[in-house]
Image (spheres, rainbow, N blue to C red):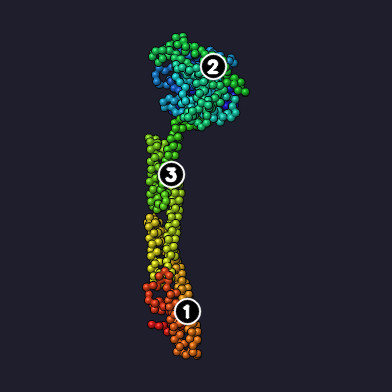
Amino acid sequence: MWLVLVLLVLAAGHCRADSCPDVFQIIRPDEAHASLELVEKGLGCLEALDSPISLVGVVGSVHTGKSFLLSALNHSTSGFTIGPTHEATTMGIWIGMTSMMGADGSRVLLLDTEGFSAAGVNEAFDAQIFATALMLSSHLVYNSVKLITAAEVEYLETLARRAHLWRLRDVGISPFRFPPLTWVVEDFCQDLLGATPIDWLMSFLGERDMRAGRRPLVEGNYTLASLFEDIGAHTLFLPAFGRQALRNLSSVAYDDLDKDFLSQIDDLRRRLLEDIVSISSVRSGKLSGRGMSAFLRVLVNSLRDGHFPSLPSLWSSWEGQLLSRARADALTYHSTAVKLAMHKPPMPPADFAANLTAARIETERIFRDSLFGLEPLWRGPMDDLRVELSAREVKDYEINDAAVDRELDDAVEEAVSKAEHAIERIPLPLRAAALDAAASEHVVAASEFLSLRIGRYATSVPKRHARALRRLAAACKASVTSVKLASAEEESRILSRAVSSGLRTYDLEMTASTIRLSAGILPISAREIESLDLAARHAALIDFDRSIISPRGYETEDSDASTRSRWLRRSDTALMLNKTTPG
């Protein structure tokens, strides 16, 4: 797409060829310092160059000596403007003319850029400056002062990734590749202890040297070595000595600069020129000034049309990490608080709701305090956090309600079991009144047990609490009914055995007495038979009395006559034994 637009611009004819200075601006920041604007006068100077050109571009943080480095590469100290104050001097992108030639015979131009991380300038603007310089340069120089730091490597990594995505999005398979990269460290006085500058740089880029905490902002390993065709490093000594000279190096003649510095800048210049060639494409060949101008228009229009991909800035990445950590900490606390509230036995729903409310309040406080002083950052995510807490609370209420139901069921089952076992252990048979009294005592004990265990739920879930009590009452009623039936059955079995035993005794006594009497005089008189009958009845009743007295002491407080009378009245079969009762 870019190449088609470049060819269309070229076909429109030559731009105006004004008389141009050696250094001219081609791009400036817009009024908001947020995007790039073309400088037509500078583009006209660029378009006046008909022969192929190649650019050495320099990028880096603000006030690291980029403009001075470019002037020194051009054997000067006064080509690009150098600022003696802390304020940034270079705005946008500038071009410097030289008489140097590239390896392919192209004319070498120098490209100066606005420094990164200037006050009041966001990272998105830095990314546009970097991407444009990258696309225009045949060799890119990253300039730093004193040291190579992980922070600068990470920042360059982010900028390079963003430019790479922009190139892929707008070009697809592009004929333009990342140029070679040289990292220059100015004002370097330290001892590398036998290592080379490239060894030093690669200690930040090599996967084998990745250390804990030294990671790029984008997930994965550093990719600079794979994005750029070639990576080199070069150190430069102090160019001069003295406060006034270092404050304004443009006031020092080039030949008066430090000899070590001049030797090192010659080495750097030689290395840059030995393999620099003009940007070329399959269709248009090597780019001239006119082609570069057309290409630049396409790049800037693409940026202004919103094609430049958005990647997290350093601040945005940090904000994202803060938000993620604050949210995780807050939700961890909330989960812990809810887990503690879900103890056994479960809380009444009203108390559980109060605990959830307290947990929510504390969770929100932790989230806010973790982002103290960043209210604009947490205000929107706070709404999202509240939505998630509400969703969690719905599930937590359901879990606690289910636990309350299980607790009520378990309590009823335990109380019923206690009542049933106690009632089953009542000695049988018992008279109805005594049985009622004994069973009632156990029912009351079970009811008190259940009321004590589930009393906490009486207020918050009164219907479920009352239903549990009714379930116990119904179960106890059934158990009492069952034991009464068992008592009646036991009475019937005892009575049946007693009657049978008494009748056997009567038969045996009558038979024995008759045999003894008949051994004498026969026949036996009626009076004698009646006497024998009375004696047999008496023996039968004594046996009957022994049979109905419980081995556990049942009926022992009653007299024999009372016992006999009450039991015999309950047996039609035994009435014959009670026709004439002695005493």
Q: Are marks 1 and 2 in contact (CB under 8 Å)?
A: no
Q: Residue at x 38, y 46 (%)?
A: 358
Q: Amino acid at mark 1?
A: Thr
Q: Is residue 296 visible?
A: no
The residue identified by callout 1 is: 505
Residue drawn at (43%, 70%) of the image: 551
Of the pair 441 and 559, the residue shown nearer to us? 559
Q: CA distance from mark 3 to mark 2?
A: 60 Å
Where is residue 146? Give x, y as percent. 44, 19
Label 2: element kind: helix
**Along the line of sight, which residue is nearer the eye, 167 or 263?**
263
Tell me how far mark 1 sits from mark 3, CA to CA.
81 Å
Frontmost of labels 3 and 2 is 3
Residue name at image x 46 percent, y 10 percent:
259
Q: Which residue is mark 2?
A: 272
Identify the image quadrant of the C terminus.
bottom left
Q: Earlier in the sequence, mark 1 or mark 3?
A: 3
Which is in the foreground here, disc 1 or disc 2?
Answer: 1
- Place residue 246 in its image quadrant: top left
Q: Residue furthest right?
A: 282
Q: Quadrant of the N terminus?
A: top right
Residue 483 visible within the image: yes
Three-letter code for the amino acid on which mark 2 is drawn: Leu
Which residue sits at x=39%, y=19%? Answer: 85
Residue marked by disc 3: 335
Q: Nearer the viewer, residue 10 or 253?
A: 253
Q: State which tag comes first along the sequence, 3 or 2.
A: 2
Q: CA distance from mark 1 to mark 2?
A: 136 Å
Q: Is residue 305 left or right of residue 563?
A: right
